[in-house]
Image (cartoon, rainbow, N blue to C red):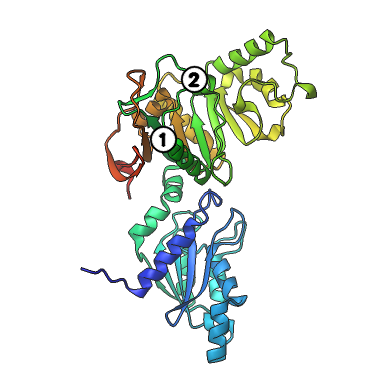
Amino acid sequence: MQTSFQPQELFMRRAFELAALGRGHVSPNPMVGCVIVYEGKIIGEGFHHQYGEAHAEVNAIHSVLAPNATVSMIRKETGLSPEDLLRQSTLYVSLEPCSHYGKTPPCAKKIIEMGIPRVVVSCGDPNPEVNGQGIKMLREVGVEVVEHFLEEEGQETFRRFFTHMAKHRPYVILKWAQSADGYLSRSQGKPCLITGKSLQVLNHSYRVEEDAIMVGTETILADNPRLNARMFRGKQPLRVSMDLHGKILKYIHTYLTENGLPSTPSPELAGKLPLRFFDKTQQTLLFVDMNRRDEYRFIEEWPGNGSEKLKIVPVKLSTAWPEMAAAYLKGLQKERIGSLIVEGGAALLQSFIVGDHWDEIRVFTSNKDLGGGYAAPRIPASQPCGFEQFGSEWVHIYRNKQHIP
């Protein structure tokens, strides 16, 4: 049986598509898309491009006023100005228009100023500064507002933002690559490339979509990772790790001593630190024991591409892994990080699983057997929501049942 869609559904789904174009650039703001429709024709489109810049509704309105080719054609047929068309149009937007002055003026006010008579909204904005006020502002001046339109699909679009608002922490994606027989790496801890090129490129595409990527101390020391997106174009994520017991600090001091290098920073020593994590090529954050904070100052001062790219954040130690995971998330929330990929190792992943500090799991499964080593974490109670095959390798995606709207 062929499924038919109402035009209104197509318009809102187009708004969702537009919203996705802002992924990786607007956090901690939500990705928002907007479509303006006159007599069944889309005459304007917009989305939120960049944090701090104009919102979707404003961009859509400006696309009508420019005007675009569709507006120009309708003007020739009807003699109506772009402003006239707006006063006879319906605006479809994936999230409630904002009602407060932030980095930009309120979108609800702009809609009112342009005289748009009807607004269709998918999801309300849980931000305490909005939370129904945008819709109230529109209705108070006579704008017809339709709420909760394709709301379930909208919630999928906004799952990162809604988690950020409701749980006061980033949206957490646990990601690991495992062998066909269920191991993360070999026991001796040597770097071990498990997946093929296709999944490596996919992994880098994931990185540009999220705000931050996190690995544990042992991963930093054993693999010396770059934690960037070399294989996919886009912004680089904030890279995050921790050194709660001074292992990284000891490694660096030993390296400097054995190579006759002083710990005192000087220009000629730029780039000589042994770990890529500290190369200052991208924004980097390291959690450390609050009682040892001063021991890391020489790393901050070490020459590189800019001292502002490395931040040392002290945290209170706990013997409970889940409590430390919560502390990391609290620290990242203060840094306005809206989404986080945790890539390992096993102990760090387990700390997020045990504490139920996760929203999504992505498992890359190779066709290779390792025959032993560090076992991959067990998938906790979850809702399978997707899988894809890349040659003889697989990606499976799971959502936390407790966190699904």
Closer to us: 349 or 293: 349
Residue 68 visible in the picture:
yes
Q: Mark 1: which amino acid?
A: Lys
Tell me the element at label 1: strand
Q: Which residue is mark 1?
A: 175
Name the residue rendered at 56%, 40% in the picture: 237
Name the residue rendered at 72%, 10% in the picture: 260
**352 left or right, relative to 295:** left
Q: Are there few (<14), some (14-19), or many (20+) residues within 10 Å of tag 2?
A: many
Q: Is residue 371 above or below residue 141?
A: above
Which picture quadrant has residue 62? Answer: bottom right
Which picture quadrant has residue 63? Answer: bottom right
View extreme (left): residue: 1
Residue 84, x across and y down, in percent: 55, 85
Residue 266 visible in the picture:
no
Q: Looking at the image, do the residues carrying marks 1 and 2 touch, with CB atoms under 8 Å apart?
A: no
Q: Are there few (<14), some (14-19), or many (20+) residues within 10 Å of tag 1?
A: many
View extreme (right): residue: 267
**Sooner in the amino-acid sequence: mark 1 or mark 2:** 1
Q: Is residue 344 above or below residue 339?
A: above
Q: Which residue is mark 2?
A: 218
Q: Mark 2: which amino acid?
A: Glu
